[in-house]
Image (spheres, helix red, strand yellow):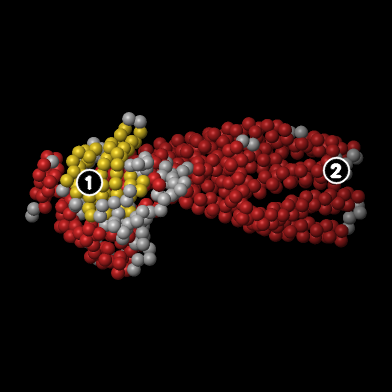
Amino acid sequence: MNPETKRRLRLLFSLFRPRLAALAAGFAALLAVDAMQLFIPRVIRDAVDGIAAGSADEQSLFRQGLVIAALGCGVFVCRYGWRRLILGASRQVERDLRARIFDAVLGLDAPFFHKNPPGSIVALASNDLNAVQMACGMGLVALVDAVVMTLACIGFMLAMHPFLTLIAVAPLPFLALATALLSARLHHRFAAAQKRFAELSEFCRQSFAAIRLVKAAGIEARQTRAFGRIGRSYIRDNLRLATVQGALFPFSGLMGNLCLLLVLLAGGRLVIEGAVSVGELVAFISYLFMLTWPMMAFGWVAGLFQRGMTSLSRIMKVLDSRPVMAEPSEPLPLPAMDKGVRIELSGLNLDSGPGRRLLEGIELSAGPGLLGIAGPTGAGKSLIAAVVARILPVADGCLFINGVDANRISPAAWRGLVAFVPQHSLLFADTVRANIALGRPDAGLAEIEAAARAAAIHDEIMAMPAGYETVIGERGVSLSGGQKQRLALARAILSDKPVLVMDDPLSAVDAATEQEIIANLRKIFRNRTCIVASHRFSLFEEADRVVVIERGRVTDRGSHRELAARNPWYAMVAARQAMDLKP
C-alpha cells in the first residue's frame, strides 16, 4: 500500500471513528442477512429431497415454508437495519467531509483562488463528494457482502461436493485479472471526467454571475455554443469512462453465467449417475446464484472504489493546501494602540510571476487621519489597499503596525483591526440589515441605521419594500452600483475598527451624494487610521497626505493642494473633476 493510499484511509477512518458503534451494529445486521440467506437453500434441499423420496407430507412442507417465511422476515428487518445504520453513517461522513472542505477553503487566501476557480471548488463539494459517499456507503456494504457471501457460498459448496465446486469457480481467476486491468484505466479516465465537470461548473457560474453583461452584449448564443462545446467534451470523457466502467459489470455477469453453465453440465451428469441428489443439486445451484451477485459486485465495487479514491485525492489536495499567509509559529500580541494605529510600508515589492513586478520599493506611512493614494488606472493602488488589508501576502520587513512586522502577527488578529471596502462591493443574497451588520451581527437597528445614514443610503433603504428587512438578490443584483458601494461603506463604518481601508469606494456615486458622504466621514477620518485609494480627488481634500503611484512606484507625495499646484498629472485630473462638479 503506497503512502498516498494510507493517508486517504487515515482520513476516512478519522471520519468514521465517531460512528464505529453504529457501523458495527450495521455490519452485524448485514452478516445476519447473509446467514439467513445462506440457510434458505438448505431448507429447500431438504424439501426437494423429501418430495423426491416420497417422505414429504403437507405438515413438513408447511413447516419448511414457515421457516423460509420467517427467514424472509428476518432478512427484511435486518436489511432495513444495515441500510439505516451503514448508509446513514456514510451520509454523516459526507456531511463532515463537506464541512471540512468548506472550512479549509475559507482558511485559504488569494493565491489559492487565483489557481482554483469557484466552479472547481463547487465540483469538489458536489460531484467528487458524492463519489466518496457512494464508495463509503454502498461500496463498503457491497464489498463486505461480496466477500462474506463468496467465502460462505464456496464453503457450503465445498461441503456438498468439492469437485463440482472446483468446476464452478474455475472462471474466477479470469474475473480477478480483468478487474485489475480495467480498474487501473478507470482511475485516469474518471479523473479526466471530473476535471471536465469542474470546467463545466465554472463556465456556468461565470455566465450566471455576469448575466447582465451577457444580456447587454447580446452574446447568449455564443455562450450557449461555448457551453455546448464544454458539454460535448464532458460527454466524450464520460463515454471513455463508460467503456471501461461498463465492461466490468457485464464481464462479471458473463463469468457468473459461465459458472452456472459448467455446473449444470457437470451436476446434471452427477445426478444421472446418482452421485448427488436432486435436492443437493438444487441447493448447489441456489448457492451458485448467490455467488453470482458477489462476482458481479466485485467489478462494480472496484469501479466505485476507484472513483471514490480518485475524488478523495482531489479533495485532499484542497484539505492539504495551506495559506501563503500562514499563522506564525510564535505569533506576537497586537501592539499597544492607546496613541492610535500607524501602518507602514517599507521597501514593498510585489510580483505576479517571474519578471512581472507590480509594486516596487513602496514607502509610505499612515497614522491616525486620512492617507490618500492617487494614480492612473493600473498603477497599483488596489494592490496597496489589498496588502494593508492582508488580502495579499508580503515578505518579512515590508508591512508594519505600530512598529511590529505584519508577518509576526496572526493574520486573523490583523484583519480584526481593519475594515476593508473593496473596489467591487460584495453582498450576500440576504436582508439589507444582515449585509450591513455582517461584521457585527449583534449590532442594534439604531447602530445600523446610523451607519447607513453616514453612507447616505438610509433614505433609499426605507423606500425599499421591507426597509432594512428587504432581501437583496445574489451579489446585490437588485441594487445599483452606487447603492452597493454605499452598503459596503455602511458595513465598514458599523464595524468601528481602528483602521479603515477603502479602494475606490465612491466610483459609482453621483457628485452630490459623494459630497454628503465626505461630510459625514470627516469625523471618522479624524478618529481612525484611514487609507483611501481612489480616482475621485474630492476625498483627498480631507486627507492629511496624498501619495501618487505610477507604474507601481511612488512618484510624488504631499497635500492635495501641494500636488494640485506642482504635479502636472495630478493638477490635470483635479481640474477636470472640479469642472465636472460645477452646476
Quick check: 14 left or right of 320? right
Query: Which amino acid is tagged 2?
Result: Met
Q: Are marks 2 and 1 in contact (CB under 8 Å)?
A: no
Give the position of the N terminus as an image quadrant: top right
Quick check: 560 left or right of 331? left
The residue closer to the viewer here, 303 or 337, is 337
Residue 129 visible from this viewpoint? yes
Mark earlier in primary sequence (2, 1): 2
- Tell me if mark 2 has few (under 14), some (14-19) or many (20+) residues whose alpha carbon lies within 10 angstroms of its own: some
Q: Which residue is mark 2?
A: 160
Q: Quadrant of residue 264?
A: top right
The residue closer to the viewer here, 137 or 265, is 137
**Mark 1: secondary structure:** strand
Name the residue located 38 percent from the left edge and 54 percent from the top edge: 334
Q: Position of residue 518 (x, y in %)?
A: 19, 57
Q: Quadrant of residue 295?
A: top right
> Which label sits on residue 373?
1
User: Rounded to the nearest whole Å, what is the CA distance between mark 2 and mark 1?
Assistant: 90 Å
Name the residue located 73 percent from the left edge and 52 percent from the top edge: 31
Give the position of the C terminus as an image quadrant: bottom left
Q: Quadrant of residue 492?
A: bottom left
- Examine the rendered structure and indicate whether residue 520 appears above or below residue 227: below
Q: Position of residue 83 (x, y in %)?
A: 64, 55
- Examine the rendered structure and indicate whether residue 449 appears above or below residue 403: below
The residue closer to the viewer here, 542 or 275, is 542
The residue closer to the viewer here, 426 or 451, is 451
Q: Position of residue 370 (x, y in %)?
A: 22, 53
> Which label sits on residue 185?
none
Query: Which amino acid is tagged 1?
Result: Ile
Name the residue located 62 percent from the left edge and 48 percent from the top edge: 13
Q: Position of residue 523 (x, y in %)?
A: 22, 61
Discs 2/1, front: 1
